[in-house]
Image (cartoon, rainbow, N blue to C red):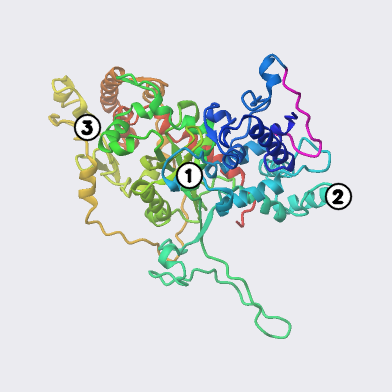
Amino acid sequence: MDKSWINMPRNTCQYMDGLNKFLDFAFANKSVEGKIICPCPKCNLKKWQTREATHEHLILHPFPKGYTFWLLHGETSFVQNTTETPPVFQSNEHKVSGNDPIRVMVNDAFGNFFYDDNVEDDEDMRPRSSEMMPDEIAEYLKFMHDGQQSLYEGCGKYSKLSFLLKLYHIKCLCRMTDKAMSMILELLADAFDYAKIPCSFYEAKKIINKLGLHYTKIYACPNDCMLYYGEDKDKEVCKKCNESRWKRRKKNKTIDGTMKKQKKVPAKVLRYFPLKPRLQRMFMSSKIAEHMQWHASGSTNEGILRHPRDSEAWKNFDLMNPQFASDARNVRLGLAADGFNPFGDLSTSHSTWPIVLIPYNLPPWMCMKQSSFILSMIIPGKRAPGNDIDVYLRPLIEELKELWNNGLKTFDSYSNEVFNMHAAILWTISDFPGLGTLSGWNTHTGLACPRCNFDTSPKKIQGKFCFMNHRRWLNARHKFRLARIHFDGSVENRNPPLTISGTDVLRQVENVNIIFGKEPEVEELGKRQRRDHQAIDGPLQWRKKKNLCSKVLKVDELNQLQNRVVLTLCHMEILFPPAFFTVMVHLIVHLVEDAKLGGPVQYRWMYPIERYLGKLKSYVCNKAQ
């Protein structure tokens, strides 16, 4: 029997004809009460099925290349001679090879619609038959039919879809404009009229966009007062400042004197990338789905920090939420935010704020790679959002609440089952000014340190706040506590500030009334501000990097490091003037405790985010948009 159809795409006529011939042969020779043993490798040759069930099952679970499956389905010659060499696959020159990586990628992308029919007993979790296929599966089949066509008759290397995806990849890497792409496609279509090449980039995008993962445009008030979203999506003016949602444009007249109709242009647009389909897509690839459970598969050693899963914050979160922690596939995320000028210069005339989510379920060698980052939204400039960033975070917060409370039915291609996926934000990542933007904590006053909270006593010298008195972190019997002359002339008897809990923070902000929005007039642009987190570059910072930036942290060594850091800061208070001790110098005393709470610092610092922002900046070619 010819077996070459096994390696053909499942949407081809050759595959369907070969499958039907095999089923006819198998049921004629080895059927028992109208059933045969399912030859699918996922069933391990143990499951008995009818012809219709076997037909549908083999479409959803194709055979691996060279799989010899009819040992128990009627071929006696194969049973007698088990050393027989399987027939060589004869490729069809008019179709793309069955090992096409683009086809594998598409199958992974749409894998959530192809469930195993014995995954769950719940009817909603079962796959639907061909007569009850959902719209998504029908769209997928049409997409496969259109996209898996060979580029031209006789081409076995590129399909129409793979050619367009590779060309689109070149466009992104080389930063080509849409117009240049359309001109290239037009030239290729004209030169190779026998090939299935679209004549414009617009037509090419119509094919590529079927892969999904689109973004949503949400109009916003130009003064950051509100989003035209949800119940406010049809409003024409802002409900706070009465500013129009559209740009003001000059009215043009035609030759006969009538007013020319102009298309309305929104004043400000938020680009939001929905989180749910992106998390689902991670579980559609069997390799990534396996890695998403890595944090629960490995063993953890007490006293050693290798991953955020070893941190106190992760473990306390699991203790407080046992139902969430019961399934290792539930996603734990970090939220990173920072502003940058997308126009390639160093001026502060424009500030765009991307919001990035980082999945911490992944192992260390994948967690902080740019390929694992999830771009959540792009908050437009020209002014930084400031405290009004909460206005733009509303769609993400609503989606996270739904994922936390209700979950989302997701297909796990590694376990071959459907589960209810939940997600949670563990912490945020930002530089210190960005921390003030995300949390609302004022980082420019005497209470700038969020860890000390209100239990601090800074000194103001010529309008500048100085954070000293690090002797309170020393041992209670240390001699520096009584040294009046070498410090500020006082004896230090206080204990370190108490760690503030989440309940304390909620109690502090429960009566805070926040009014979003900015004044309509444009603020004057000042000189470029210095990045405070780069102010210290001396022996203390070098020693902190050497110890805290290790791949593996030991809790015992961190305790010793904390004592050395506090003692070094006290020696610096003796040598340096008070003006040297800004809040950035003071924050060094909290870094060791942060490492205990959150794990190794590589998973929570800004360096990978800054590199990612540099990559996004390289994509911006048009300063007008």
Quarter assignment of residue 309: top left
Q: Nearer the viewer, residue 540 or 72?
A: 72
- Helix, strand, or loop for circle 3? loop
> Tag 2: residue type?
Asp
- Helix, strand, or loop for circle 1? loop
Residue 368 appearing in the image: no
> Tag 3: residue type?
Asn
Q: CA distance from mark 3 to mark 1?
A: 65 Å
Of tags 3 and 2, which is closer to the observer? 2
> Tag 1: residue type?
Arg
User: Cβ–Cβ below 8 Å for labels 2 and 1?
Assistant: no
> In terms of sequence position, does the residue under pointer 3 or pointer 2 come before the other?
2
Q: Give x and y (percent) for residue 158.
A: 76, 38
Is 314 displayed left or right of 51 in the figure? left
Is 300 displayed left or right of 184 in the figure? left
Residue at the spot 61% in from the left edge and 54% down from the top edge: 623
> Which numbered circle lies on residue 126?
1
Q: Give x and y (percent) for residue 75.
A: 68, 24
Q: Nearer the viewer, residue 558 or 59?
A: 59
Residue at the spot 57% in from the left edge and 28% down from the top edge: 41
Q: Where are the magenta residues, as a range? A: 85-98
Q: CA distance from mark 2 to mark 1?
A: 45 Å
Is 11 displayed left or right of 239 in the figure? right
Q: Nearer the viewer, residue 97 or 129?
A: 129
Which residue is denoted by mark 2 in the rendering? 193
User: Cβ–Cβ below 8 Å for labels 3 and 2?
Assistant: no
Residue at the spot 19% in from the left edge and 40% down from the top edge: 455
Q: Give x and y (percent) for residue 407.
A: 38, 46
The verdict on residue 95 being magenta is yes
Quarter holding the N terminus is top right
Which residue is denoted by mark 3 in the rendering? 469
Q: Give x and y (percent) for residue 164.
A: 72, 45
